[in-house]
């Protein structure tokens, strides 16, 4: 498929800074930002509120098919609405983050949300971030990055983000959670966390966010110049 503007896929583990980097890249390029992780967080939140266990794959898949999930564009990035209600703040708690990792391991869930992701990004001129954008959702994405950082740095960033939103966070607990999620996301049978074979791997442990953003924007410019 030939697109006027590319699909930019940014994958990587929890806490690597994908969301903030993707937001800045989209802003710099004038592209649409699709926060795929928010879809899984939204499903985890909706399941918890309905008493559906995060381990119940079939029930989660049915719920994902039934939910109305869409994004509202705002100056702060895309805001997830669930059944017409803005839940953008509610999906950012640590327990919902854990739930997102659990529900995303189920084939029924990934199948239900795959179509939504592809519909949102199919025309190009979009930035998508997640765990499997470059490997499963858009294997034909023109620009692919796998963004990571050391577990300790990712934990530090996550604690800083949570405290910035008024949430008390313990570094050791956050670090332990990140390591558990890394193991789970990498070991799952369906769409495991791994770099696409044609992705550029970028370790941001020692990099500032604007350096990471500049690297990705430059890669898009190089693609468009071909």
Image (cartoon, rainbow, N blue to C red):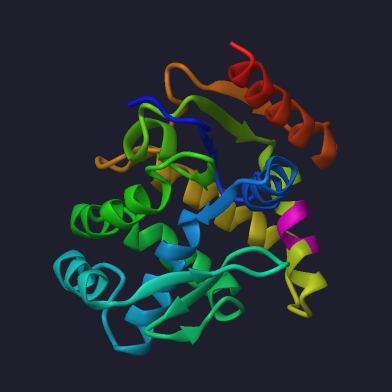
User: Which quadrant would residue 150 be assigned to in this image?
Assistant: top right
Residue at the spot x=64%, y=50% of the render?
15
Q: Between residues 181 and 223, which one lies in front from this camera angle?
A: 223
Residue at the limit of the structure toward the top, as seen here = 226
Residue at the limit of the structure toward the front, as seen here = 4
Quadrant that contains the N terminus = top left
Question: As displayed, is residue 51 above or below residue 173?
Answer: below
The image shows residue 189 at horizontal and vertical percentages of 25, 40
Quadrant that contains the C terminus = top right
The image shows residue 164 at horizontal and vertical percentages of 82, 71
Residue at the spot x=37%, y=31% of the render?
135
Residue range (magenta) = 156-160
Residue at the spot x=32%, y=79% of the render?
47
The image shows residue 51 at horizontal and vertical percentages of 29, 87
Question: As displayed, is residue 139 above or below residue 184?
Answer: above
Question: As displayed, is residue 61 above or below residue 203?
Answer: below
Residue at the spot x=43%, y=24% of the render?
196
Q: Between residues 55 and 36, which one lies in front from this camera angle?
A: 36
Question: As displayed, is residue 114 above or below residue 72?
Answer: above
User: Which quadrant would residue 188 be assigned to in this image?
Assistant: top left
The image shows residue 102 at horizontal and vertical percentages of 36, 60
Q: Between residues 132 and 126, which one lies in front from this camera angle?
A: 126
Q: Tell me: 136 left or right of 200.
A: left
The kind of secondary structure the magenta stretch mainly shows is helix
**Residue 29 included in the magenta stretch of the image:** no
């Amino acid at each position: 498929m030939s697109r006027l503007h590319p699909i930019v896929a940014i994958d990587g583990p929890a806490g690597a800074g994908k969301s903030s980097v993707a937001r800045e890249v989209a802003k710099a390029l004038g592209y649409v930002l699709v926060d795929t992780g928010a879809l899984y967080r939204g499903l985890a939140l909706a399941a918890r509120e309905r008493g559906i266990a995060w381990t119940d794959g079939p029930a989660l898949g049915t719920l994902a098919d039934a939910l109305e999930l869409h994004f509202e564009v705002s100056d702060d990035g895309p805001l997830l609405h669930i059944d017409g209600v803005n839940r953008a703040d509610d999906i950012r708690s640590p327990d919902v983050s854990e739930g997102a990792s659990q529900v995303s391991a189920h084939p029924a869930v990934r199948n239900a949300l795959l179509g939504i992701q592809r519909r949102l990004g199919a025309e190009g001129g979009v930035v998508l971030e997640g765990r499997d954008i470059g490997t499963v959702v858009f294997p034909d994405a023109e620009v692919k990055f796998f963004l990571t950082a050391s577990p300790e740095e990712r934990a530090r960033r996550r604690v800083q983000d949570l405290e910035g939103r008024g949430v008390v966070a313990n570094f050791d607990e956050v670090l332990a959670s990140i390591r558990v999620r890394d193991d789970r996301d990498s070991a799952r049978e369906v769409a495991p966390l791994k770099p696409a074979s044609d992705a550029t791997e970028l370790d941001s442990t020692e990099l500032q966010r604007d350096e990471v953003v500049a690297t990705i924007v430059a890669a898009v410019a190089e693609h468009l110049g071909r």
